Image (spheres, rainbow, N blue to C red):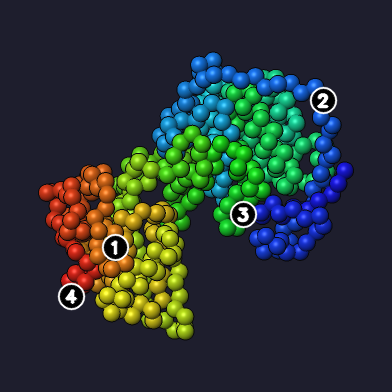
């Protein structure tokens, strides 16, 4: 038996304990782990049996649909049987509640085992009574022993297994604490093997670190078939389910839930709810962005103020930091505005993160609106890209954008003068370059 030390943040290996990890520069992250000697390999190794695609049994491979629309959307249309999934999020954000609702729906057709290593059976019952009707089809246990869980699954052969949470589970013969690197790695490998060999779907929950990533070694994220984050919008009871990894679906899809005392309810028409929160004041601009297959109305908020520091502040959330800084630089270059002497505070409301370039024009308008202390036109929406020369370019595949804009009473569309597929139902204000944006604030 050999002792080694691994960084809990990045899994860096060291033969002895170190105060600071040389790989990720985090302090006090090294944990002791025991390296077992490998058993001698049997000289008589069996050859691998190869099969063609036609010989593979494709029965019972339909996706498992929960009829919870937003969950099924993020899963790519449902869960693939035999997959190993990880759900992560802040404590108390609703991971267990969501999984209890999902298992309640799936238990109508599947045999479901729910292992909770964090709550007693009475605590599970208390929560379940609030969010689901009496259900005798889900089998519960508060045992966190992974050896027992694996053996139970092999014997009872359920269709779906929930383990809440993976960091609190342990192996009987382990010398390290639950949640340690060695135990998390072993748990990941054994549960993945269990899922694939027995065609059982396994969903585990996990804690997150202070920077919002899954706690424990990155090995666990590499092993599982899907990693999903449940996040909260601070200003209202919105829960957002995001896909960070999905071997069987898109990682662009986002699911929205409204959280109340009865659990999490799918929000099928999120744009209507988002539109209720929009305020047409100085520093705000409305745009639209496609997340997965769904166009979303998004409010951008900017605040610019003369800086009292030698280096102006740039505090930006919900969008790429460099994108906002770049657009501010373009406006300063061509419009002769002093953004370099101003602090810039920028956020995307509703807790949504923007990745598309179609929001460039809205970013520029929100910055200008705050700078001049004049609001953009009411009930207006901006779409368009801005290049380094200050030219405004049309967005591609605008049909879905325009269709969504027509549904929600937008009266003015601000866009490039070369934008196609425009609607004749709303007023169109066209721009060729950033110079022309000033006419909105004159």
Q: Nearer the viewer, mark 4 or mark 1?
A: 1
Residue that badge 4 annotates: 442
Determine which of the numbered discs, if any, sits on residue 95 in the image: none
Residue that badge 1 annotates: 386
Quarter of the image where one finds residue 142: top right
Residue contact at pointers 3 and 1, CB within 8 angstroms: no
- Which tag, 2 or 1, sits closer to the chain's start? 2
Q: Secondary structure at mark 1?
A: strand
Alpha carbon separation for disc pair 4 and 1:
21 Å
Residue that badge 2 annotates: 43
- Which tag, 3 or 2, sits closer to the chain's start? 2
Residue 192 placement (x, y as % from top left): 64, 32
Alpha carbon separation for disc pair 3 and 2:
44 Å
Which quadrant: the N terminus? Answer: top right
Q: Is residue 401 above or below residue 131?
A: below
- Compared across the picture, whether 128 is left or right of 176 comes to left
Residue contact at pointers 3 and 4, CB within 8 angstroms: no
Residue 125 seen in the figure:
no
Taking the spot 38% from the left edge, 66% from the top edge, the residue there is 324
Residue that badge 3 annotates: 209
Q: Secondary structure at mark 2?
A: loop
Alpha carbon separation for disc pair 3 and 1:
36 Å
- Which tag, 4 or 1, sits closer to the chain's start? 1
- Which tag, 4 or 2, sits closer to the chain's start? 2
Residue 270 seen in the figure:
yes
Residue 206 vs residue 388, the one in the foreground: 388
Quarter of the image where one finds residue 377: bottom left
Alpha carbon separation for disc pair 4 and 2:
84 Å
Q: Residue furthest right?
A: 1
Q: Nearer the viewer, mark 3 or mark 1?
A: 1
Alpha carbon separation for disc pair 3 and 4:
48 Å
Pointer 4 local density, CA inside 10 Å: few below 14, some 14–19, many at least 20: few
């Amino acid at each position: 038996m050999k002792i080694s030390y691994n960084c809990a943040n990045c899994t860096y290996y060291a033969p002895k304990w170190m105060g600071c990890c040389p790989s990720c520069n985090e302090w006090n992250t090294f944990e002791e782990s025991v390296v077992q000697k490998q058993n001698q390999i049997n000289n008589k190794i069996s050859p691998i049996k190869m099969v063609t695609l036609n010989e593979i049994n494709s029965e019972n491979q339909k996706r498992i649909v929960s009829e919870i629309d937003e969950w099924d959307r993020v899963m790519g249309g449902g869960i693939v049987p035999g997959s190993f999934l990880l759900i992560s999020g802040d404590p108390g954000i609703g991971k267990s509640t969501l999984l209890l609702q999902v298992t309640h729906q799936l238990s109508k057709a599947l045999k479901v085992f729910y292992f909770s290593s964090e709550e007693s059976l009475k605590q599970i019952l208390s929560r379940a009574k609030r969010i689901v009707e009496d259900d005798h089809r889900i089998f519960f246990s508060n045992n966190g022993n992974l050896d027992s869980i694996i053996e139970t699954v092999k014997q009872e052969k359920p269709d779906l297994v929930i383990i809440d949470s993976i960091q609190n589970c342990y192996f009987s013969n382990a010398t390290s604490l639950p949640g340690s690197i060695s135990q998390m790695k072993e748990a990941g490998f054994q549960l993945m093997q269990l899922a694939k060999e027995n065609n059982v779907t396994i969903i585990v929950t996990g804690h997150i670190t202070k920077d919002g990533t899954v706690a424990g070694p990155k090995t666990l994220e590499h092993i599982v078939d899907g990693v999903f984050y449940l996040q909260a919008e601070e200003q209202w009871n919105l829960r957002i389910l995001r896909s960070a990894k999905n071997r069987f679906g898109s990682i662009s899809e986002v699911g929205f839930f409204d959280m109340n005392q009865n659990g999490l309810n799918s929000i099928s028409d999120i744009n209507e709810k988002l539109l209720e929160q929009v305020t047409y004041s100085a520093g705000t601009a409305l745009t639209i962005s496609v997340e997965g297959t769904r166009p979303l109305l998004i409010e951008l908020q900017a605040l610019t103020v003369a800086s009292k520091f030698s280096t102006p502040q740039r505090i930006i959330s919900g969008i790429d930091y460099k994108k906002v800084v770049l657009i501010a630089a373009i406006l300063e270059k061509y419009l002769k505005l002093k953004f370099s002497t101003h602090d810039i505070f920028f956020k995307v409301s509703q807790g949504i993160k923007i990745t598309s370039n179609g929001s460039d024009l809205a970013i520029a308008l929100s910055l200008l609106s705050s700078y001049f202390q004049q609001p953009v036109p009411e009930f207006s929406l901006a779409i368009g890209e801005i290049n380094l020369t200050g030219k405004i370019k049309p967005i591609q595949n605008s049909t879905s954008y325009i269709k969504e804009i027509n549904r929600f009473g937008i009266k003015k569309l601000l866009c490039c003068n070369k934008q196609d597929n425009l609607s004749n139902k709303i007023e169109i204000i066209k721009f060729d370059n950033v110079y022309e944006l000033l006419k909105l604030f004159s």
